[in-house]
Image: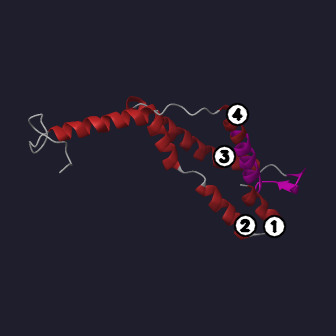
Amino acid sequence: NVLYASALRAGSIGMALGGRFLTGLGGPRSMNRRYIADTTPVASRTAVNAAFGTATAMGAALGPATAVLLDRVNFELDLPLYGTAEFNGMTGPGFLMSALWLVFAAVLAATFVEPERTGLEEQRRREEEEAGANAAGPGGGPVGGGGGSAGTS
């Protein structure tokens, strides 16, 4: 986001495109979905995924609305290590998101506790039960009637 916000100051369209490209890489939804699957019971997973989808859609809707508001702002700010930052409709979204991500990272680092992976454990139990039921065959005994465990010779 800082790269994107700094593109106007540098006069570089490549810098703006590179910053937007890198920003786009920062939202791996598959990781979020995996985390939801690992940490929520199967019974509530649909509701949790729906809430995640709703939050994602709200963010997608608020982004352009915020950009419209930021287009009305125009000021310069002297920042340490950066110099003079022009904050306007072109640079504002990048600077705002940079600040929000810094706050988010600080709050996350200070408060996040890894939850128990109940969803992952529940999935493992289900897979073990299914594997046991499949190995038992139609009569309840081992498949092949050899008396040994499945997969051994």
Q: Earlier in the sequence, mark 1 or mark 3?
A: 1
Quarter of the image holding residue 127? Answer: top left
| Quadrant in which the N terminus appears | bottom right
As rendered, which of 39 and 62 lies closer to the eye? Answer: 39
Query: Helix, strand, or loop for circle 4?
Result: helix
Q: Could you tell me which residue is drawn at 57 percent across and 34 percent down? A: 114
As rendered, which of 62 and 152 lies closer to the eye? Answer: 152
Tell me how many marks there are. 4
Pointer 1: what residue? 10
Q: Could you tell me which residue is drawn at 79 percent across and 63 percent down? A: 8
Q: Which of marks 3 and 4 is nearer the N terminus?
A: 3
Pointer 3: what residue? 65
Tell me where the magenta segment starts and ends, as one range. 75-104
Q: Which of marks 2 and 4 is nearer the N terminus?
A: 2
Pointer 2: what residue? 15
Q: Could you tell me which residue is drawn at 45 percent across and 38 percent down? A: 38
Q: Could you tell me which residue is drawn at 47 percent across and 43 percent down? A: 33
At label 3, the amino acid type is Ala
Left or right of 53? Residue 60 is right
Viewer-nearest of discs 2 and 3: 2
Reply above or below: 110 against 80: above
Pointer 4: what residue? 110
Instruction: Decide if residue 46 is in sight here.
Output: no
Magenta-span inclusion, residue 140: no
Percent across and percent down for residue 77 are 89, 51
Query: Helix, strand, or loop for circle 3?
Result: helix
Instruction: Decide if residue 89 is in sight here.
Output: yes
Query: Helix, strand, or loop for circle 2?
Result: helix
